[in-house]
Image: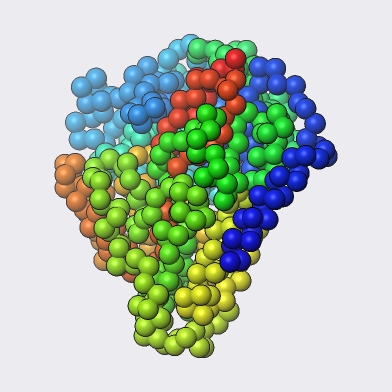
Amino acid sequence: MRLTRYILGLLLTITLISVIAVSGLGCAEAENVLRVNLGGNPTSLDPQKTSSARDLSVAVQVFDGLIGFNQDLTLKPVVAREVPTTQNGGISQDGLVYTFKLREDVTWSDGEPVTAGDFVYSIRRLFATETRAPYRGVYYVIENAIPYRKGEVTAEEIGVSAPDDYTLEIRLTGATPSFLNRMALWAVYPLRQDVIETHGDDWASNPDSYIGNGPFILKEWVADDHITLEKNANYWGEQTRLDGVRYSMYEDAATEYLAYRSGELDISRIPVGTERTLTDSVELLTYSQLKTNALFFDCGEPPFDNEDLRRAFALAIDRAALVEDVQGGRGSVTYCWMPPGMPGYASGYQETTGNQYAFNPDKAKQMLADAGYPDGEGLPPITLVYSNVASNPTIAQFVQGQLSENLGINVDAVGVGQAVYWSRVFGEHDKWDLSYVSFSADYPDPDNWLPDFFETNGGYNGGIAQYSSEELDAKIADALAASGSDTILRLWKEAEKIMVEDAPAIFLFNDEMFVLVNERVQGITGTAMDLYIPGDLLLESIFLE
């Protein structure tokens, strides 16, 4: 009932607001500029210092990497002349050396040539302690990366070098089948050493120093209001048909929707609870995402170091009601971490893996008693932290209601701003019991999903779950060292089942892109790994009519 009143109130608010003038939402000049909403102020536009989809949705427009993804998530050459293979000599027979031959016509937005040395600098900077790069662990397979982090070798000894201006060589510590997928990510985009050393940490917030090699450049960043990109006149590749992109920063979904309806935005997410009213709209765009939404426990501290307590919570949440009643049918129920559409994951895997935690309030109550907290007696206060954007507040409210109704447990749900959320959940560990996390694939391989989040020394695990399993660590090591696609896939599935049994998180639903698009927007090329804006990995394909 409480949730229903919230949704009705939201719909009434949208209706009322739409018939009155709203300060700050005057008619913007549409021109040939794509107008979208970023959902909040970016924490950083430095492609090595962020893991936020919102931040990266902007940064990937300003930089081009060696290789990139096609719409079907196969790899394509970008700054590299071709994707390395063993057949073309780009990958050594033992899989330890990758050689990228660069195009010689690629330039920075100030006209300077992009060379292999720019990639060498970028990769060395990625591992520097002062960079604090959240994605550095993805590249620890590069020779001497870990010893460098430990201070045992110099930056020059990291396994990356430039034999000449247009040849980049990378040496690995072991064969890594997903390495080319990793090299398509923003963390290894080229960077300008002279610019960063001159401007320091401010280089990525100033249009004069935010120099990239992509199809757009930064024109303006007004904190908490908007960011404007414009076409890069010096772009070496095929020019975009857009003159620019304007990113608004409305955190509230209802305000974003209102801005769309009033002509301020070309694309809008849909306020939670209104999905079914728009399913027949000609403006609706939907497609699947490699994305999972989950509640992570703090497994390293009481009370959730207790596995039975975690299992009781997992059994007490009706995921089908969450998808149907809260999400308006958007997305699909899941009981595991890796989403449908991952290579090698046949239909049915996500429905059966972890289904021992299908909604069962009676079993949840018994498990709660088995954990030593009959009817919640003796349980300390529980805090759930979430980023206060989009539909997250409504989802948090639903979780509160489920745990209260089915276990008699009151949970304090705390919504925080984006910067605070990233600091609390993904940075230095702060006290909380549950965190609501949405994760989208960085690249389409199982090794992107388990190690960082659930391996004992995983890059995110220390800040989120603080979960540790020797059995899981050993299975992950086996999967990373294995050869042969069938063997590798089998080991990853076995690893996930070990983790799911321990319930370090409650896996809720797999999401989909579900947005309204103005009819003037054409050419959206969406992928299952889009960041925050539909089609943002291939934004240059969009044009306006």
Question: Is residue 334 at least partly visible in the picture?
Answer: yes
Image point (47%, 75%), residue name: 406
Image point (42%, 21%), residue name: 78
Q: Quadrant of the C terminus?
A: top right
Q: Quadrant of the N terminus?
A: bottom right
Q: Is residue 388 above or below residue 125?
A: below
Image position of 246 (left or right of 427)? right
Image point (27%, 64%), residue name: 498
Front one among 534 and 490? 534
The x, y position of residue 277, in whole percent, is: 55, 43
Front one among 207 and 27? 27
Q: Quadrant of residue 309?
A: bottom left
Image point (52%, 45%), residue name: 276
The x, y position of residue 103, in whole percent, is: 42, 15
Q: How is the image coloured?
A: rainbow
Question: Is residue 99 at least partly visible in the picture?
Answer: no
The x, y position of residue 451, in whole percent, is: 36, 54
The x, y position of residue 335, in whole percent, is: 35, 59
Give the tally of numbered discs.
0
Image position of 182 (left or right of 497)? right
